[in-house]
Image (tube, helix red, strand yellow):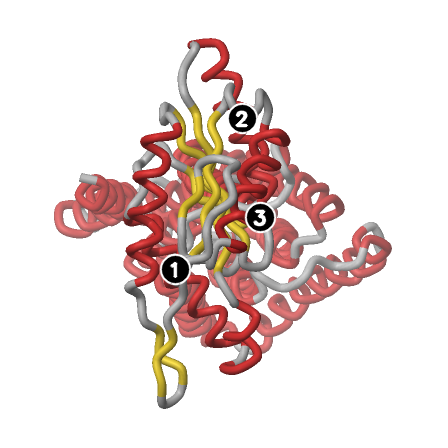
Amino acid sequence: MRQITGLYQRLLLTLFTLMPMMAVAYIEVFQEPSLRFESHMVHEMAIALAITLSAFITYVTWRCYTVSGEVLVRWLALGFLGFTLIYLPHGLLTRLAPDDQGLFLVYGPVSRLAMAVCFLVGLYYHDAPADALESRKRLSPWIKAGAAFLALDLVLAGVYFLSATQVKFLFTMVEIVALILLLAGVLFMALRRFRLPLMVIYMISLGVLSQSSIAFLLSDIWSHQWWLAHGISAAGFFILSFGVVQAFRTTRSFSTVYSQAQVMEQLRVQQARTLDALAQLEKANTQLARQAATDWLTGTANRRQHTTRAKEDIARASRDDGDLSVLCLDIDHFKQINDSHGHDVGDEVLKGMCIEIQRNLRAQDLLSRVGGEEFQVLLPETDLGQAARIAERIRAAVAALRFQAEDTTVGITLSIGCAQLGQDGIDMDALTRKGDKRLYLAKEGGRNQVVTDDAPVALSD
C-alpha cells in the first residue's frame, strides 16, 4: 500500500503540474484567432503587481540566504532579482506596443531566461557547502548583480534599435532557450529524486513556468493565449514564492524543511534504530553479566556467582526448612596432566569434564569453578544421601572419560567431599570447610572416591 499510495501521490503531483497545458491546448484548438483583448492599463497593472511581488520575494529569499548561506537559495534570490529588474521595462514600455512592439516584448522572454539560468545553476549547486557567514551579508555582490541586470536592459534596447527586424526571431530563440533550461531543471530534479517538500514545490514551479514559455511561443500579442501565458507564468512564480515564504517562516533553508510524512518516517527510522541499539545494549549487558558470572574456560559459574547463589539457596532452605547439600570436587593428579601433556590438553580436560558433570546434574543444580582444578556443586532440595548418589554418578561418569593427547589418551578421576546444610554447618563457609575436609579424606584414602563423613578412609588396593 505504501508503494501504491506513493505512486498515486506522484501521479497527482504530475497532473497538478500539467494542468496549465490543458488550458493551453484548449485555447490553441478552440480560440478564435481574430479575438484580441488589448488593454494597456490592465497589462500595466498586472506587470506592476508582478514586479512588486517579485521584489518582495527577492528580499525574502535574500533574508533566507543570510541565515542559511545555502547556495541554492543564493541563486534563487539572484533569479528573482534578475526577473524583477529585466521584467520592469516590459511594463514601462506597454504604451509603446503599437509602435515598437518588439522592444515591448523582448524583455519578457529575457527575464524568464535569466531566471531559468539562475534556477538551474542553483540546482546544480544544491548540495554545496554553505557560504561563509561574513560573505552572506555583504551587499556589494548584490549591487553588482543588480547593475548587471539593468545594464542588460540597456543592451536589449540597443540590440532592438540596431536590428528591429530580427526581434521576432530573437524573441522566439530566447523563449526556446528559457523553455529548455526550465525543462532541464525539472529533469534534473526528477532524476535526483528530490523528496523534500520545498524542493518538490521548486520542481512544480519550474514545470509550470516551462508551460508558460510554451504558451508564449504559441501566442500572438494580446490574444487569449498570450494572456493565459501571463497567468501561467504568474502561477509558477506564486508557487515558488510560497516555498520561499515557507522556508523563511521555518528554517530559512530549502534543504532542511521536511513534510509531516518525512518527519514521521524519520521518527520511525530513529525509533527503530533506538530499539535496535537498546536490544544490542541489552544483549551486550547480558553477555557482560554472563561473563562476570561465568568462568571463561569452562563456562561454569565462577566464584562470584557461586557465592551469590549459595546465599540465596541457603536462605531459602533455612526459611522453608528444606535440604541443601554441597559437593567439593578436585581432579586427581591434574598437575601431572599439565606437566606431561601441556596446558592445552589440561584445558580440554577441564572443559570436557564440566560438560560431563553438567549432564549428570539437574536444572536447579549449580556447578562452579572455584579454583584451578577445584569445583563445587550446589544441590538445592538434596539431603546428604541423595548428594552421595549424585556424587557417585558424577565420579563414575568422569572416570570413564578419555581425552586425546598427541599419540595417547588421558583419563582422569575425581575426589569428592559431600556436606549438608544443618548437620555440617549453617552457612557456606562452614559447608565448604566440611566438604573440603572430606575431599582431602578422599584423596588420603586413595582418590577417585566420594566421602560423606569425617571417618578416615582406608587406602584402596
Instruction: Give left or right: position of 357 versus 57.
Output: left
207 relative to 7 in the view: left or right: right
Q: Position of residue 195 (x, y in %)?
A: 41, 49
Residue marked by disc 2: 424
**Quadrant position of residue 293:** top right
User: Which one is nearer the viewer's eye here, 78 or 109?
Assistant: 78
Q: Tag 3: residue type?
A: Val
Marks 2/1 in contact by CB < 8 Å: the verdict is no
Q: Nearer the viewer, mark 2 or mark 1?
A: 2
**Is residue 339 something one can see in this rendering?**
yes
Q: Quadrant of the C terminus?
A: bottom left
Q: Residue at x 82, y 53 (%)?
A: 133
Q: Nearer the viewer, residue 39 or 226?
A: 226
> Quick one: which residue is furthest to the bottom in this view?
407
Asked if marks 1 and 3 touch (Cβ < 8 Å), the reply is: no
Q: Vertical placement of 361 versus 311: above or below?
A: below
Nearer to the camera, 126 or 382: 382
Measured as percent of width and height from the top left, residue 236 is found at 42, 45
Nearest to N terminus: mark 3 or mark 2: 3
Q: Amino acid at mark 2?
A: Asp
Picture coordinates of residue 417, whole percent (x, y): 48, 43
Residue at the location (58% across, 20% down)?
Answer: 426
Q: Which mark is residue 353?
A: 1
Give the residue at mark 3: 370
Q: CA distance from mark 1 to mark 3?
A: 15 Å
Disc 2 from disc 1: Cα separation: 27 Å
Amino acid, disc 1: Met
Decide which of tag 2 and tag 1 comes sooner along the chain.
1
Secondary structure beneath dot 2 equals loop
Mark 2 surroundings within 10 Å by alpha-carbon count, few (fewer than 14), some (14 through 19), many (20 or more)? some
